[in-house]
Image (cartoon, helix red, strand yellow):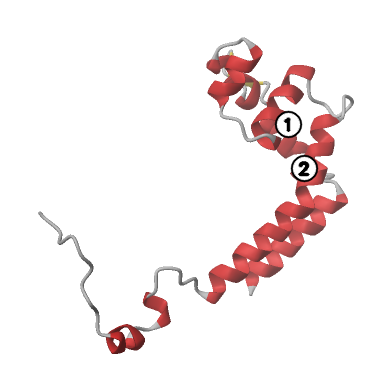
Amino acid sequence: MTYPDKERATDPSLLERLPASRSLGFEPEENRQWRHAFADFAARVWPVIAGIINDPEGGLTERQRQILFLYIIRRMPQKDIARCMGVKQCTVSRHLYGVKRNGKKVGGAVAKLRKICCGSDPPPEVEEALKGLARARAR
């Protein structure tokens, strides 16, 4: 299929009659509200997560803390973390998500972090942020 080298003229009245919902950058109000609510949630929770990751007494091993920092805070892919730390990518994955031994899941920094943040006694900031997110979702 060939395309002409020049743009074709379009009748401006045709474009003016298109509804806004058909435009390329259109975002429904509900989606916009949810996006803002989630951004607010993340802004409130990130400092708590960073604090947990940086706390040597937070229940994570030193290696898990290092890998979580690079993976969550720095947003590095597992492959790059592995190269940086001189280990295989599967080792990074095991530190993040755990491994099954004798049919039981062992380790897993992400699961530990989730348990700390969303377990029976979550930090108050996380609990309040989750409630705010639920309120926004209910609207």
Q: Residue 7 versus residue 80: which sits nearer the camera?
A: 7
Q: Residue furthest front?
A: 6
What is the x, y in percent for residue 26? Answer: 46, 72
Residue 119 can be seen, yes or no: no
Q: Is residue 120 above or below residue 91?
A: below
Q: Which disc, if any, is residue 112?
A: 1
Q: Which disc, if any, is residue 52?
A: none
Q: Which sits earlier in the primary sequence, circle 1 or circle 2? A: 1
Q: CA distance from mark 1 to mark 2?
A: 9 Å
What is the x, y in percent for residue 127? Answer: 80, 54
Quadrant location of the C terminus in the rendered image: bottom right
Element at label 2:
helix
Neighbour tally class for label 2: few under 14, some 14-19, many 20 plus, Cα within 10 Å: many
Q: Is residue 115 above or below residue 67?
A: below
Element at label 1:
helix
Instruction: Examine the image and state in which quarter residue 54 appears.
Output: top right
Q: Which residue position holds label 2?
A: 117
What is the x, y in percent for residue 118? Answer: 75, 45
Side of 38 relative to 117 (left or right): left
Side of 8 relative to 26 (left or right): left
Q: Are marks 1 and 2 in contact (CB under 8 Å)?
A: no
Q: Residue furthest left?
A: 1
Residue 103 can be seen, yes or no: yes
* Residue at the image position 57 percent from the left and 22 percent from the top: 80
The amino acid type found where label 2 is placed reads: Cys
The amino acid type found where label 1 is placed reads: Lys
